[in-house]
Image (cartoon, helix red, strand yellow):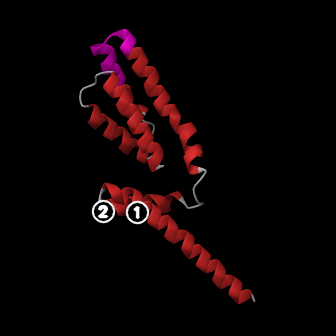
């Protein structure tokens, strides 16, 4: 989820810079936050599209609108691609790990916390299965 959100925010940032939107970094950060909570980035990009239509040429605005729609639709393509390679860990575990890691260690903890908690979850499940197999024997 975090990787997809990061890719979407980077793509949105490229589009914002290309359309010469003021505060592109701040808008890209808002896209990142919205994408982390798994809402569509178009929630942030739609008002910006209206701004670009009013402030820039129609060609730039149409290209930015198409780019924003593609950024929003990239979620459907990237999530199965990136999440399919992971472990079967409930999303709540990942979310709690990411938030706890961010609180503890900042932006690095956002990524490390989710990995540590997911790994701990998998190890705990393996330990429980091993205990059940020992009881059955």
Residue in the image at 41% along x and 33% along y: 11
Is residue 28 positioned above or below 119 on the image? above
Look at the image and give the residue range highlighted in magenta: 48-60
Number of the label disc, if any, that sits on residue 74? none
Q: Which residue is mark 1?
A: 113
Tell me residue 129's x, y (percent).
Answer: 65, 78
Magenta-highlighted stretch: main secondary structure?
Answer: helix
Q: Secondary structure at mark 1?
A: helix
Tell me residue 46's x, y (percent).
Answer: 38, 26
Q: Secondary structure at mark 2?
A: helix
Task: From the viewer's perspective, tell me whether residue 2 is left or right of residue 123.
Answer: left
Q: Which residue is mark 2?
A: 105
Whether residue 59 is in magenta: the answer is yes
Separation of residues labelled 2 and 1 (CA atoms): 9 Å
- Kindly indicate the quadrant of the structure image that contains residue 20: top left
Answer whether labels 2 and 1 touch (C-beta < 8 Å).
Answer: yes
Is 131 in front, or is 39? 131
Whether residue 132 is in magenta: the answer is no
Residue in the image at 44% along x and 49% along y: 2
- Kindly indicate the quadrant of the structure image that contains residue 31: top left
Is residue 73 positioned above or below 39 on the image? above
Location of the C terminus by quadrant is bottom right
Judge whether residue 96 can be spotted in this image.
no
């Amino acid at each position: 989820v975090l990787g997809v959100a990061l890719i979407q925010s980077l793509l949105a940032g490229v589009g914002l810079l290309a359309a010469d939107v003021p505060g592109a970094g701040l808008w890209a950060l808002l896209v990142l936050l919205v994408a982390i909570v798994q809402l569509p980035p178009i929630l942030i990009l739609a008002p910006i599209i209206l701004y670009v239509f009013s402030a820039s040429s129609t060609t730039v605005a149409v290209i930015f609108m198409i780019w924003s729609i593609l950024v929003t639709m990239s979620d459907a393509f990237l999530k199965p691609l990136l999440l399919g390679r992971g472990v079967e860990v409930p999303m709540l575990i990942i979310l709690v790990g990411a938030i706890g890691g961010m609180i503890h260690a900042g932006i690095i903890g956002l990524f490390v916390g989710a990995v540590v908690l997911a790994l701990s979850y998998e190890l705990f499940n393996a330990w429980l299965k091993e205990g059940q197999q020992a009881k059955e024997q």
